[in-house]
Amino acid sequence: MSQTTPQVADTEVLDRAVDAPRVRVLLTVVADADLAAALAVVGRQVYEPGPEVVVVGDVKGLDLPEGVSVSANLEDAIGSTDSSFDYLWLLHADARPRPDALSALIAESERNDASLAGSKLLKAGTMDELESVGGATDVFGEPYSGLDEGEIDLQQYDVVREVAFVQSASMLVRRDLAQGLKGLDPLLPPVSAGLDFSQRARLAGGKVISVPSSEVYHQTRCGARGSARLEQAGRLRAMVTAYSRLTLLWVLPYDFLVSVLDSLGSLLLFRWRPLVRHVYSWAWNTYHLPSTIRQRSRLKQIRSEGDEELFRFQARGSLRLRSILEELSARALSLFDDDQALARGTKRVWTAPGIWGALIGVALILFAARSILFTGMPNTGFSFPFEPAGVALERWLGGWNASGLGSPTSVHPSVGLTGAASFLWFGLEGASRTLLTVLAGVLGLVGLGRLAGRLGLRGPGRYLAGLVLIAGPGTAALVGRGSWLALAAAAMLPWAVRAAFIHPHHARRGRLGLAGWALLTGILLAALSPLLVVVPLLTVAIWRGLGGDRGSYLLGLVTLLGGIAGAAFLLGDPGWILDPGRRLAVEIGALWPMLVIVATLPLLVVGGRQGRLGLTGGVLALLGVSGALLVPLGPGVEEALLVTGSFGAALVAAAALDSISRSVFAIVAAAGGVGMLVLSMVTMSNGRLGLPAGDVNERLEFAITLADDDGAGRILHASVDRSLIPGEVRAGPGFWYRVLDASGTTHDEVWLPQPRDGDRELADAVVDIASGADLRPGARLASHAIDWVVLEGPAFRLDEVLVAQLDLVPIPLDPSARVYENLDAAPLAAGDGVVWERSGSGFSGEEVDGRIALAVNHDEGWEPESLRDGWHASVSGVAGQASYTPEPLFLGLAIATVVGLLASVAAIVVGRRRR
Amino acid sequence: MMRYVAATVMVGLGLTAVLLPPAEAPAPGFETGLESPPISVCPVVETANRHSALSILSSVDGEGRISSFAAGSETGALEFRTGGSGSVTLQAADVGAVDFTGTLIEMPSENTASGVTVTGGAGFAAESCADTPSGQALISGGSTADGSFQILLLNPYAGEAIVDMVVATETGLESDARFSSVVVPAHSRINMDLTAIIPGRERISVTMTTTRGSVLAAGLQAIGNRTALWRAVEPGVDWWLPTPAGGESKQLLITNPSASQVQYQLDFYGPDGLVELMADGMLEPHGEVRIPLTEQTTDAVGYRVIAAEPVVSTLWVDSAEGLAATTGSQMEAPTWLLPGARGPAGGAGRAVVLNSGLDGVTVTVRSLKEESLVRDFELAAEDVLVINLVEANGYRIEATGPVVALWTAQSEGDGSAAVGIPLHDG
């Protein structure tokens, strides 16, 4: 913009000046703003007759030029303006108008018959960066400028137009209207003050326009006066002041709802301030309600237009919600698209290779999960419903582990995760389980694509390779046995590994956020499969050993720290790592290792990142597969190795399918990758992502239906076919068996804790019964609260011996199992003539003076007044409830996990703010 | 360089996974040997003119329990102690037994046996009780032509049982819906009165196949004031039957439970030892041969039946002196228990011990009562020893080699025969 040079007035000009409207400048003092400079700028305005200047605000200690008067507040200044003035120019002291700014305002106001005109605000000290050209709002007063962040003024908005509001930094208002409106609301910060004033002006019959030719550089120091939360509150006040009662009747509840949704949406984006702002806004307005009512009364006196006049300039819906939804969807879409093409909405969207791979992959995952989506999750193998959120979290925080005959040792860490998921999903355990499972499929796919992207791949194959992760050699074997957790752990693994690699664009970013992600993903991974936390560090080591960059040992170690989530479980049940007798001993055909080798070796020739990633994946895949097959360790090790096997195979597939050239080697590698994809798809094509069909709980529902007043006790489930028994099993003489909760098996019961006295006694009883020597097996099992004996699969020894016994009554309840009812079974908790029921992780019932025998393994932690009664515990019945006091070690480790989780989230949030 | 090292490692791992045998899969513990709980299931008759006494023999002074059952529950029970002699005799009426029913005896230890003796105005009968049920059992020798014949199906266990019966008579296989899928509820008995179902049959054999649960069976034949009580047994290929001398109408019944022909051979022990091929032939499907023993030879002291497929051999005595029936033994053993064996008041009882071996043995005979009597006898190879019995709860026979023991009695104008119970480990 060129500086306009003042012209020497000739006679014609003087004549025009005599007829020109008179203007009084009300220069509002702004803290830290240079008032003298502001006065000087005003003085340079090319306008005749020269405007009279009144400084509004506290000017103590300032030496004002001659002719400049002072007013304590804007209302007084407006009120004291006599009728010889036509316009008032409300100007902030931090505004620096160009010399023709005033004349432009007046000229356009006169030409457009406007009552209120606002200048175009440019940010001072920038290359003509636009701050405001007036704007629209939504019905809640949320301003919408239409400007992009940092948008430069190229005169693209230089059209005089009616707007919903103009900012109060520089506005020209007819004197009579200003006096009727009694000026700006002194309680409001600048933006909402402008909004409020504009709305009142419009309702009073005034026309509000933006005059782009009036350019004002704004130092935005006035912004410091009003924080964001005060602006939020001011918008609500402006709304309450302006709208009719009928409009308020629906707008206020609607605004409250929007506030709630905005807060929740922002929390999903790790922003807590919007919540605070909304709370503050409603509280502030409640406090200032009397003055708001007075404002409404004043407006009522001069109001000549209805709310429709305001609606004309308002956007539909909520700008806030639209913004938050746009951001959330952009975040979600950006999962698939490293180039952010979708998020930016560019035409390159459909040329981004990852998008196609991701969309096809997600479609395949959803197809593979169709039975889960339409008919629900299977309840079999190692996949069972979540416990209610409160109970699950109580158990995870060191509460009583009710699996089998009970144990003080910690439950599997995933129990806490499922509890948290159910809690967040409004306590709907079934829905959260379904959601987590399907989400696991999608997240696994996306995670692998993002990891491969971070390691330099760009093709569509990196997303499709996620199918190999979900249904590769190891996960297919585990998921096929019903291990829901293997699916979830496989899905989480690439995210944790990715957290140990640094994207080149992020290299200069704060390490805090990266460490936060590494810790967070490590904790989540450990909660699903504790030993898998080693894999990110291992991957970094192999990758870097092969000359790769971006891998961080430090972040890998931070991921390892996430293992704290599984520490309590591992300490309580070392057999999960060490006892080979608990392995599933799954079978993996020779085809998978061969495919991995076939796909990997040609990639060595292809070289580059493809070669390195393929080789890294190949080593991981075959390390995992061969380890799982050959290493005689516990089921935890087996699980981690098998999932690692799939993860490695998926990396190989990603590298093999990344870019296909005419090279023979690339074609052979791609053929291997396609082979792995096809094999995976076949595995997961049963509609349940590879999980087996069946509902054990439904089949055993008779135990609930036929339960007597003692309640549903326990089921002794036995078979020679290990896969027919839910969860982990114990070895009996020639068959497998375990004890189940007759009220329905839940996720926490999948793992059987280390045997204790009750378990050993039960084992002896099972051996005796299986020998046929025990004529009354029901009596033998009674103290373990075993109400039912269920035999599955082919007939075996127990079938033989239970034919000739006296107190287990065979009942033909299930066509595929042999069911025996034990009429002599003791209740789970009873004594002194009363029976107690389950309550959370403990028991409760009628208060009695005597003792209550609990059919659980004895531990001192039972309260009140725990005593050993044989193998089981008994408590005093005086309190009417029995609860378990956690062991300090397990409770401490659970708390440490929570602290780690919060610390990781905090690190991520702080890291984001620093960015 | 590292790439090639890694590739080599990878290929090595792959080959390892493919070529090496996987780690041993977890397996459940070893199956333990099958033990039978020390029980006996005895058919008892408790009517106005028939009373049953239950004799329990063991080698220890221990406690046990006897109960009677009917209609799904216990009708009565009694705790007992075997005392210093390791034996006791109880009255079935004391445990609430009524009619032709069953009792379950929970024995104080292994190596026990029990037997039932039916006395009263309507005949005298005795039989050893069964311990383990079998999937298939056969009872032969009944008749509905000139008396009543009942079969008692006993299910003392907690599960319902289903039995399919194949009833063969001189007219062939009987077809009656009541013989198929006979349901025996838990803790119950089913009394099948064949007299009402198939009257007028002279030779009846019943093969019972249990398709679900467990059942023990016994037959009760009454002709006038003569009564015979004997239990169904599992078919076998070898049978030994000591036979006391005398008796005018002893018959050996060899019955084929299967639906195919079975070849059999009958040998006998006489003064010259074992004489093979006294008779042989082919048993028709579900067929039976009745061999009148006294018409073949009067010298026989014992018999042996060998069959190509399992059959059942039954001794059937129907004479003016009495009516008796018992099955042979499928095994030889050095130690036998003869529960209930005694010389009844007003009658006589005899134990018959057959040495089927090629060497002579010493036989120790012990009466089990408060003051036991013990006597030793020398028994030549392939010879039989007959001992007169005195009042006791039963007898224990111990030999230095394998023998087969049986006891007979005559009282109240009727007779009885009951094969002993061999002890597996003394």
Image (cartoon, coloured by chain):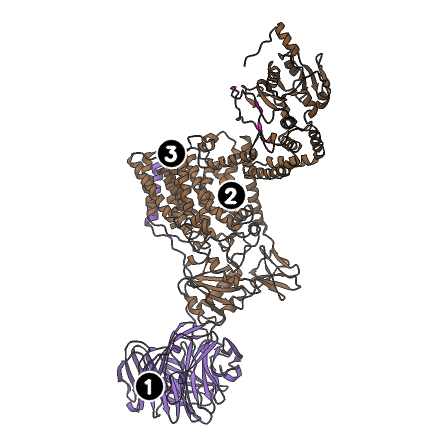
Chain colours: A brown, B purple
Compared to residue A23, the image places residue A293 above or below, namely below
Query: Which element carries disc 3, helix, strand or loop?
Result: helix
Above/below status of A720 relative to A428: below
**Amino acid, disc 2:** Ile
Query: In front: A213, or B70?
Result: A213
Residue B299 drawn above or below residue A733: below
Give the quadrant of the N terminus of chain A: top right
Query: What whole-number distance in Å separates the C-alpha atoms at marks 3 and 1?
Result: 92 Å
Read off the residue under disc 1: B252
Residue at the image point whose x is 34% and y is 89% from the top: B250
Mark 3 lies on residue: A609
Image mark 3: chain: A
Q: How crowded is mark 1: few (under 14 residues within 10 Å), some or many (20 or more)?
A: many
Identify the magenta region.
A134-163
Q: Which residue is drawn at 40% across and 85% down?
A: B195
Instruction: Classify 10 Å Cα crowding around label 2: few (below 14), some (14-19), many (20 and above).
Output: many
Q: Does the magenta stretch include residue A400?
A: no
Quarter-of-image position of residue A270: top right
Q: Considering only vertical position in the picture, is A109 above or below B59?
A: above
In percent of width and height, residue A370 lies at 43, 48
Q: Which mark is residue A794?
A: none
* Element under disc 2: helix
Question: Identity of the amino acid at label 1?
Answer: Leu
Residue at far front of view: A304
In this figure, which residue is indicated by the disc labeled 2? Answer: A523
